[in-house]
Image (cartoon, helix red, strand yellow):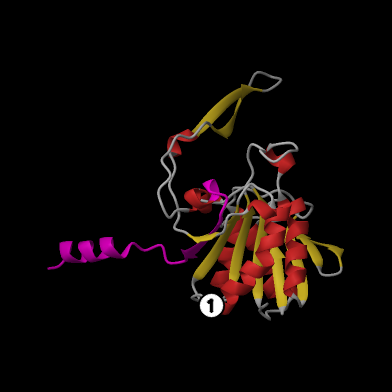
Amino acid sequence: MRILITNDDGIHAPGLAVLERIAAKLGGEVLVVAPETDQSGVAHSLSVNDPLRLRTISERRYAVKGTPTDCVIMGVKHILGGVKPDLVLSGVNAGQNIAEDVTYSGTIAGAMEGTILGIPSFALSQAYGKNAYGGPGGREGIRWDCAEAHAPGLIQRILAAGFGRDIIINLNFPPCPAERVEGISATVQGRRDALAVQIESRLDGRHNAYYWIGFGRQNYEISAGTDLEALSKNRISVTPLKLDLTDEPTVTRYAQLFES
């Protein structure tokens, strides 16, 4: 098996090293093509106004000055000479990619581009939060062992079961040690309060204003069967996402509306 892996946290991110070990457990040849720098939040953006720069890190490891989407295209179309790999893995992201996160996520986008190119593709993300299991909390206390222990077997099970050509598999691992995982849930995409997004205004050294997008405390109800619920119960969330964003019931309603 030939596996192409990428991420949005950059070539030196710890989650990418975790993903390399996950891919190695699946067997075959692993090719790493990841962004030169952190590309979190770039979604499915494509570089069309700037050239792509490719840097060889070591054998079968490359950095691209571009987005996760650029990396997958560069890997398939240039490095592999148009020969499709058997699998694309994107991640392991530092933090969950659930609910509306999927619309912003460069991790999801890497897997999305693989799916567009006709390759079975997975996005992997490791949630973190207040550490109730000892050690530091936040990003410094990410339990990478959770994703590393559970991902290889889970990916093999999903591949054996099969999924549609236009489907992206979004995997999210709960913020707990590997042995504390309570199971696996097939989930739908949840929904949170978008009003939690905030604009923070600051002044630079010359008293000119600049701004950061930030996130405040989010109050929302967790619906049954969602990715939000799965992680809240220390369960791995498996969410199949579709490339086709069309809402079919609305299309049917509009077809009746515009009948002449």
94 left or right, relative to 109 = right
Badge 1: few (under 14), some or many (20 or more) residues near its Cα, within 10 Å? Answer: few
- Tell me if residue 162 comes above or below residue 206 in the rendering: below
In this view, which residue lies farthest toward the left? 260
- State the image quarter where residue 47 is shown: bottom right
Name the foreground residue: 213 vs 236: 236
Q: Is residue 215 left or right of residue 27?
A: left
Image quadrant of residue 169?
A: bottom right
> Quick check: is 243 in the magenta stretch?
yes
Identify the residue at the far right of this view: 58
Whether residue 66 sits left or right of residue 163 in the image: it is: right
Residue indicated by mark 1: 162
Question: Which quadrant: the C terminus?
Answer: bottom left
Q: What residue is rendered at 52% in x and 53% in y?
A: 102
Element class at badge 1: loop
- Residue at 79 percent of width and 52 percent of height: 12
Vertical arrangement, residue 61 with respect to residue 204, above or below: below
Q: Is residue 206 visible?
A: yes
- Seen from the viewer's position, the closer of residues 85 and 170 is 170
Residue 7 seen: no
Marks counted in the figure total 1
Report x, y in % for residue 162: 53, 77
Q: Which residues are magenta?
A: 231-260
Query: What type is the residue that disc 1 sits on?
Result: Gly
State yes or no: residue 253 in magenta: yes
> Of residues 139 and 82, which is closer to you in this image?
139
In the rendering, at what x and y percent does residue 56 appear? 84, 64
Q: Position of residue 187 (x, y in %)?
A: 47, 59
